[in-house]
Amino acid sequence: MALKINSLGGYIHEYQKSVNTPEKFWAEIADNFYWRKKWDKVVEWNFEEPRVEWFKNAKLNITENIFERNLFTHADKPAIIWEPNDPNEAHITLTYKELYEKVCQFANVLKGKGIEKGDRVIIYMPMVPEAAIAMLACARVGAVHSIVFAGFSSSALADRIEDCKAKMVITSDGNFRGTKKIPVKAVVDEALEAKSSIENVIVLQRTKQDVTMTAGRDTWWHEACEGVSTENKAEEMDSEDMLFILYTSGSTGKPKGVVHTCGGYMVYTAYTFQNVFHYNPGDIYWCTADVGWITGHSYIVYGPLVSGATSMMFEGVPTFPDAGRFWEVVAKHKVNQFYTAPTAIRALQAYGLDPVTKHDLSSLKVLGSVGEPINEEAWHWYHTHIGKGKCPIVDTWWQTETGGILISPLPGITPTKPSYATLPLPGVQPVIVDSEGKELKGNSVEGNLCIKFPWPSMIRTTYGDHERCRTTYFSTYPGMYFTGDGVKRDEDGYYRILGRVDDVINVSGHRMGTAEVENAINEHPLVIESAVVGYPHDIKGQGIYAYVIADMSASETDTEEELAKEIILTVSKIIGPIAKPDKVQIVSGLPKTRSGKIMRRILRKVAEGDISNLGDTSTLLNPEIVDELIAKAGLA
Ligand code: WT7
């Protein structure tokens, strides 16, 4: 595919073309793909409703672009290399032809179970090749997949099933993670205890642990596939038909279903994959994300596979059997591009260099970072010790809503700068605005990050509630998409992402809404009110700090310490272990303004351990509470 930019001049040329003649620019890129019918119009949009349509009236199926288009040249090329949790278990390689047959077969299974174009299917699975097969089989038949990260609790899963009225769940018996065997099917069973829209559950056998199978509803994956044809004709999809829904957290208590569509998402993820990772035929590319997050969707499955690349999938964790596992896997499979999150780098950095130097990392050419700002120390460690000073680091900024990478260096082509995502990719028009929405032009400015022109893989709607999409992303600064991130453009014009400016905490690269965590805490019977803020955490980037007012008198046995533990358990049960507060402080009150608004700024300061600049607290309704917070946090 002739999509690759090869020089700095090429980048500048392409970027300018994408801004001056966006339709021409994207039409030329889209011409590299297989369309059953081409578009009538490249893009039609307004950010008021909002309405965004790319490659209008074009017809395609994304899996035909992965398989049929590539099969003559790629049949025997590895599509997925799967590395299991246990290094003693054999890895699996699926060629494009093998993957194609498995996808077609499972597509036929879905159809046999009554799944039709437009139906929603929940995938709740560990990192096994079948997770990708299930996604692609959905795309093949035109069903809309919604993957729920397998670390989410049964109630979080039930909420998502209910929100999108899914007809089927695809899951596994269990999940191997490090030394642990985690129940997965049991969580699904719990989620389905109440009446739901689910008609069928397909269960992959992975851990062989005991599970309960409900007759008439549950089928084993291997039994469902027995004797089923490996030929399947792909469903014809409109460019703007839904490809998937992915739930993500925001400022409100309820996660929203971000909707992505077929044509634009395909074009943008493949284009950015090839450019940001500088993928060359024969390279082995490894992204360590989970398919439950957008990174797994766009840069393990769709972007790489549409590009005919070899994509590694890893089932395990970075520290099992030891902290050298990532590097062992890089050496074993001669990985060329390695894409991970700053939190993993910081966690591994803490184990020193022995686990690194043991392994031959000379195959590496490009290193990637995603999910949160990468601090300079971690950037240098990654660059020096993993990349041996010769691999450019692509610090890729993007979001679930953007579908693909928007700001990132192009390796070896545009400059890198520690902790900077640097420059927008072609087609991306960032603007920085102040709190009044005034555009801050020129360099050396800081403000809120917006995008003023559509790009092909952007969010189309929030499932079932278009108004929510409008108010969340398009109403703060009319006429622009608002990212929720603060940003700085330095004296050279490079972008540095400063973090969220809304009530969202980024824990280990995963987005948590403070309101969502507060709602979960408030489920504890002794809790009266709570307020959650983020604070700097050495490994996770941000940790979760919860201030809780509880009715201690209602319980005779609870100590504050026990109560804190119970609260953490409650959150784990309601959302999942990823949302567990790192610190719980039981307080008698929360600092409030006279209008009753919680002063989160004060809570953040105390959580950070910095009480030097609390500002004027005398206007608070309850100024005395500040001293209590400080004393209880051990800062007095
Ligand atoms: C938020 C999006 C994009 C896939 C993973 C997270 C933060 C993401 C970077 C980066 C600084 C980053 C932003 C963004 N973020 N990448 N390279 N530098 N911050 O997806 O859960 O949708 O979260 O992650 O704050 O808004 P997500």
Image: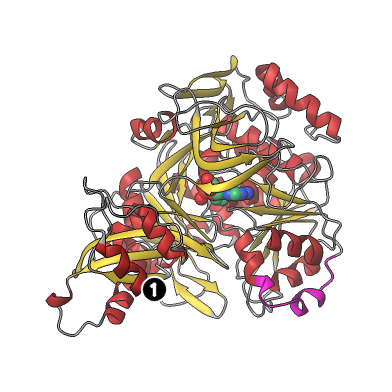
Q: Is residue 349 left or right of residue 219?
A: right
The residue lying at 77 percent from left, 32 percent from top is 3
The residue lying at 40 percent from left, 65 percent from top is 545
Compared to residue 370, the image places residue 85 above or below, namely below
Compared to residue 635, the image places residue 452 above or below, namely above
x, y (%) of residue 222? 51, 63
From the image, which quarter does the C terminus lie in? bottom left
The kind of residue tagged 1 is Ala
x, y (%) of residue 483? 51, 38
Viewer-proximal residue, 240 or 341? 341
Q: Is residue 276 left or right of residue 163?
A: right
| Residue 200 in view in this figure | no
- According to the image, label 1 marks what residue? 636
Residue at the farthest top position: 40
Compared to residue 376, the image places residue 273 above or below, namely above
Magenta part of the chain: 348-361
For the rendered model, the colour scheme is: secondary structure
Viewer-proximal residue, 212 or 298? 298
The residue lying at 26 percent from left, 64 percent from top is 625
| Mark 1 residue crowding within 10 angstroms, few (<14) / some (14–19) / many (20+) | few
Number of numbered callouts drawn: 1
